[in-house]
Image (cartoon, rainbow, N blue to C red):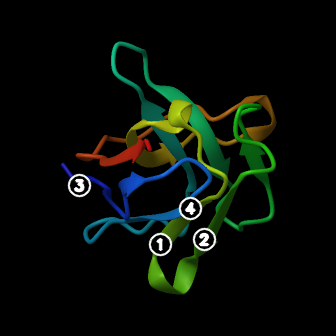
Amino acid sequence: QVQPVESGGGLVQPGGSLRLSCTSSGFRLNSNAVGWFRQAPGKEREGVSCISSSGLVTNYADSVKGRFTITRDNAKNTVYLQMNSLKPEDTGVYYCTTTMSGLAIGCRPAGSWGQGTQVTVSS
């Protein structure tokens, strides 16, 4: 089963920034909406942000609005998540996957999960 590949996580101090990347060597993301999801220790996985196949429509969780930006480069088959002003509560494993269309009602996962990338925000 083809899985997405996430990268770009790490340890950062509160207020810092990271840029996550999502790609897939065996699956073209271009024709699909793609979303970022995260799972904090002891919590369920939650939607963070998603973007339409064209890149024209985006959706963000209230907790990250104004701090995170999702973009995509279809020529590179890659979706990015720029994370600024990071907070300790942003800590978790971040995953990307394809999502259902109709982003206005939220980011609903539709594809397989990869290994994720760990983001830790701590001083």
Residue drawn at 50 percent across, 62 percent down: 18
**Residue beneath label 1, please?**
78
Farthest bottom residue? Answer: 75
Instruction: Kindly report which numbered mark, 3 or 1, lies closer to the viewer in this rendering.
Output: 1
Residue drawn 52% across the image and 26% down it? 46
In this figure, what is the number of numbered marks?
4
> Which amino acid does the dot numbered 1 rest on?
Thr
Where residue 107 sits, quadrant-wise, is top right
| CA separation in Å, label 3 and label 2 | 19 Å
N-terminal of the pair, mark 4 or mark 1, is: 4
Look at the numbered disc 3 and give the secondary structure of its residue: loop
Mark 1 in CB contact with mark 2 (< 8 angstroms): yes
Q: Residue at x 43, y 47 (%)?
A: 97
Q: Are marks 4 and 1 in contact (CB under 8 Å)?
A: no
User: Which label sits on residue 2?
Assistant: 3
Q: Nearer the viewer, mark 3 or mark 2?
A: 2
How busy is the neighbourhood of tag 1: few (under 14 within 10 Å), some, or many (20 plus)? many
Identify residue type, mark 2.
Answer: Arg
List x then y, in percent, for residue 102. Answer: 74, 39
**Spatial distance from mark 4 to mark 1, Cα to Cα?**
19 Å
